[in-house]
Image: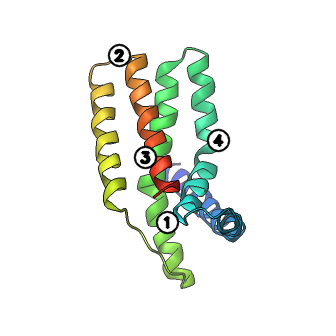
Amino acid sequence: MATTSAGLLLLGLVTVVLLAKALAPTIELAVASAGAPKAVVGIIIAMVVLLPEGLAAFRAARANRLQTSLNLALGSALASIGLTIPAVAIVSLATGWTLTLGLDIKSSVLLLLSLFVSALSLSTGRTTVLQGTVHLVLLATYLFTTVVP
């Protein structure tokens, strides 16, 4: 049973990665015509990949099921980071596509700051509106510094 589940998980992940790769040229063209930096393509692809879990987490939070919401949101992020990057690397090796991973210094600082704020938010067992606002400000800062370098 566990082997079947793991196999289906990997199959689904590879499918999503290949579909995202197929969608990328259209998004790249739209981003280039808008005059936005190429990093915006990655943000849009990440949003598309995380959209189903994000909507489910949002619905759970609106229904006052915070634990379910956190499980969905954090599980989705961990799956994206822990499984998608290796899957993309394997697919790029198998297909011969060039893969470039990297963060500039401001993105690295914002990532570390986000991890620190997340650790503070989750360590107390309670979250506040202020902590949520800090997370949203960090997200807005990242999006702004990506679009307006």
**90 over 147 or under it: above or below:** below
Image spot of residue 112 (x, y percent): 29, 46
Disc 1 to disc 4, C-alpha distance: 19 Å
Which numbered disc covers residue 52?
4
Give the amino acid type for the residue marked by disc 3 in the picture. Answer: Leu
Disc 2 to disc 1, C-alpha distance: 34 Å
Q: Are dots 2 and 1 in contact, CB under 8 Å?
A: no
Disc 2 to disc 4, C-alpha distance: 25 Å
Which numbered disc covers residue 114?
none
Q: Mark 1 or mark 4, which has the lower sequence index?
A: 4
Residue indicated by mark 3:
78
> Residue 7 lies in what quarter of the image?
bottom right
Q: Residue at x 27, y 37 (%)?
A: 116
Image spot of residue 124 (x, y percent): 27, 19
Label 4: how many residues lie within 10 Å, few (<14), some (14-19) or many (20+)? few
Q: Are dots 4 and 3 in contact, CB under 8 Å?
A: no
Image spot of residue 113 (x, y percent): 30, 41
Give the amino acid type for the residue marked by disc 1 in the picture. Answer: Ala
Q: Mark 2 or mark 4, which has the lower sequence index?
A: 4
Element under label 3? helix
Q: Residue at x 47, y 31 (%)?
A: 71
Residue indicated by mark 2:
126
Disc 4 to disc 3, C-alpha distance: 15 Å
Q: Residue at x 55, y 14 (%)?
A: 64
Q: Nearer the viewer, mark 2 or mark 1?
A: 2
Nearer to me, 43 or 9 = 43
Element under label 4? helix
Label 3: how many residues lie within 10 Å, few (<14), some (14-19) or many (20+)? few
Q: Quadrant of the C terminus?
A: bottom left
